[in-house]
Structure formats: structure tokens, C-alpha cells
Amino acid sequence: MTGRHPPRGLAAAVWTLAVAAILVFILATALSLVQDPSASVMFFGIVVSLALVGALLMTRVPGNRIGAMLLTAGVLLSAGVGLGTYAELGSRGPAIQPGQL
């Protein structure tokens, strides 16, 4: 690392991961069959703040472990919501019996 900033490739990867987490959350919330607007807004705020603050800390303060933890928490929360929506949509689809594929 040179100076106080990480290499451009790492910074780009960090910001791409943060934006991807936010987009996955938005897509999962839009596709969810259970619509609770207050919970969606609350979790959106949590995912955005965790991902963006984590990415900002990782790119501006190299070696800061808190930034990596915050970004990881945002990505995992977004992944959890996305996988929950995927499971919810899969359980409401047509039943596939063994051998029908």
C-alpha cells in the first residue's frame, strides 16, 4: 500500500461489494411476497449504513478491522434477506416430485 489509500483494485472491489449488497436487498424486498413496509425500510437503512460505512472505512482507513466487519455484516444481512426471499418464492411454486426434472 502506498500512503493512506489501498490499491485501486481493492477499493473498487470493496465498493462493488457494498453496492451489490444494497441491490440484492432492494431486489429481494421487491420480490418478497410478505410486504411489511416498516420492516423493509428499517432493514434497508441498516443494510445501507453497514455496507456504506464499512466500505468507506475500508477505503479511507487501511488496516481498520471495523470497516471489514461492518461491510461483512451488511453483506451477510443482505444475503440472508435474499436467500429468505428465494426460499419463500420456492416454497410457493409448483411442487416438483422426484423424477420430474
Image (tube, rainbow, N blue to C red):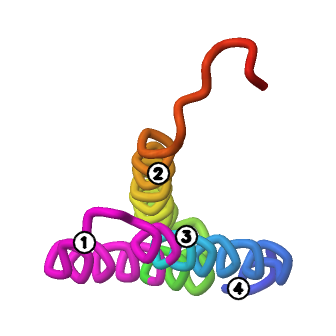
For badge 1, the amino acid type reads Gln
- On residue 24, the disc is 3
Mark found first going from the N terminus, 1 or 4 = 4
What's the CA distance linking mark 2 and mark 4? 42 Å
Q: Earlier in the sequence, mark 3 or mark 2?
A: 3
- Residue 17 screen position, x and y as percent: 65, 71
Where does label 4 land, which residue? 5
Q: Which residue is mark 2?
A: 89
- Which one is earlier in the sequence, the residue at label 4 or at label 3? 4
Disc 4/disc 3 C-alpha distance (Å):
28 Å
Q: Which residues are magenta?
A: 27-52
The amino acid type found where label 2 is placed reads Leu
- Residue under the point 83% across and 83% down: 8
Whether residue 46 is in magenta: the answer is yes
The one nearer the camera, 9 or 99, is 99
Of marks 4 and 3, the one in the foreground: 3
Q: Quadrant of the C terminus?
A: top right
Front in this rendered view, residue 85 or 22: 85
